[in-house]
Amino acid sequence: MKLSVMEIQRFALHDGPGIRTTVFLQGCPLRCPWCANPESQAGGKKLMYLQKRCIGCGRCAAVCPSGCITTEDGRPIFNRSLCIGCGKCVEACPAGALRLSSRDMETSEILSVLLRDRSYYRNTGGGITVSGGEPFLQGRGLKELLALCKAEGLHTAVETTGNTPTENIQACEPLIDLFLFDVKHPDPVRFKEVTGGDHALVLHNLTLLPPQKVVLRVPVIPGFNFDEQVLGDLFRLALSYGIRRVDLLPYHTLGRGKYEQLGRAYPYDEAKPLSRKDLESAKAMGEALGLVMG
Ligand code: SF4
Ligand code: SF4
């Protein structure tokens, strides 16, 4: 079975314990304006254009079967709504200025990449992590990949928005050692308004998981949830579900360049990045409540 894969990142240090390899899957149901992987949003493959590499040869426009590329002064102009993700322009580009956001890979092919670093996993208590996008959107392929990993004795983690079909989570749960489960806001209305997500579904899915397998993850975003009351409510929510560990992820703008490559304006310009130091008082609050904070 195939999975639509955006990237496989080896030697990851922040996606679970030890040294890990992280597989990023395409597709996400949420529209968080601070997202660092905007190419994962709204379904299929996206065309990404690195303008500074383009030499203006026009070959991409000549090969596109959908008429989505025109040129102006030799430079391509994209009508992405017409793109069918065929990749012909990527192959034709002599400058490496074009790429597609994901490619389809057999689960066995992914496994062979994951197994390359098996000795590192063994020596550091690491393993593999599947992230996204939202991995459970590709539930059947994900289950097959996880089963292959477990058959090889690998530790498995999945990072999820929780905003995903319950049956997909339930089908994979026995194959997952650790859930890195995002809860971004305690208020369903605010969560919906900003991310488009379904808070009731997220919490329903959380109730079905063994709490000892869950780390709650909170991307801390100025203007959204970087607030003592809001974070305190999230910490109490974690405790009410029997979850002992919460990781706070400071807002960053490292994904900004990807918006340019997608021909999109950066949607969260009003916020400044946070440092680990900015989160110290929030962490102290969580620890005072009895949580292990990361
Ligand atoms: S991926 Fe295919 S359809 Fe899309 S712009 Fe390139 S050539 Fe055209
Ligand atoms: S083929 Fe590549 S280098 Fe040539 S115009 Fe298109 S994007 Fe630019």
Image (tube, rainbow, N blue to C red):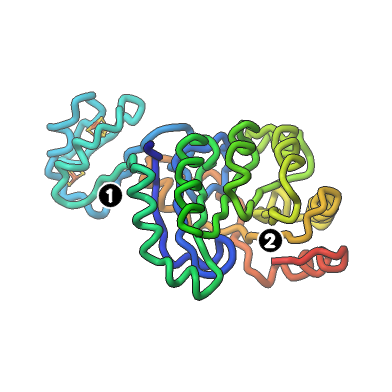
Amino acid bearing label 2: Asp
Of all residues, the one furthest to the front in this rendering is 151
Q: Is residue 230 above or below residue 192?
A: below
Amino acid bearing label 1: Gln
**Residue displayed at 81% across by 48% down:** 241
Using the image as rendered, state which of residue 91 and residue 179 is in the foreground. Answer: 179
Q: Is residue 68 above or below residue 95?
A: above
Return the disc, 2 or 1, that comes first in the chain's sequence. 1
| Badge 1 element | helix
How many numbered marks have been drawn onto this rendered protein structure? Answer: 2
> Is 127 left, or right, of 222 in this rendering?
left
Q: Residues within 10 Å of mark 2 (few under 14, many from 20)?
A: many
Q: Is residue 190 above or below residue 293?
A: above
Residue under numbered circle 2: 247
Of all residues, the one furthest to the bottom in this rendering is 123
x then y, percent, for residue 116: 36, 64
> Is 96 left, or right, of 124 in this rendering?
left
Give the foreground label among 2 and 1: 2
Q: CA distance from mark 2 to mark 1?
A: 36 Å
Q: Quadrant of residue 284?
A: bottom right
The quarter of the picture showing ligand 1 = top left
x then y, percent, for residue 268: 57, 47
x then y, percent, for residue 111: 39, 52
Residue under numbered circle 1: 51
Q: Is residue 32 above or below residue 276?
A: above
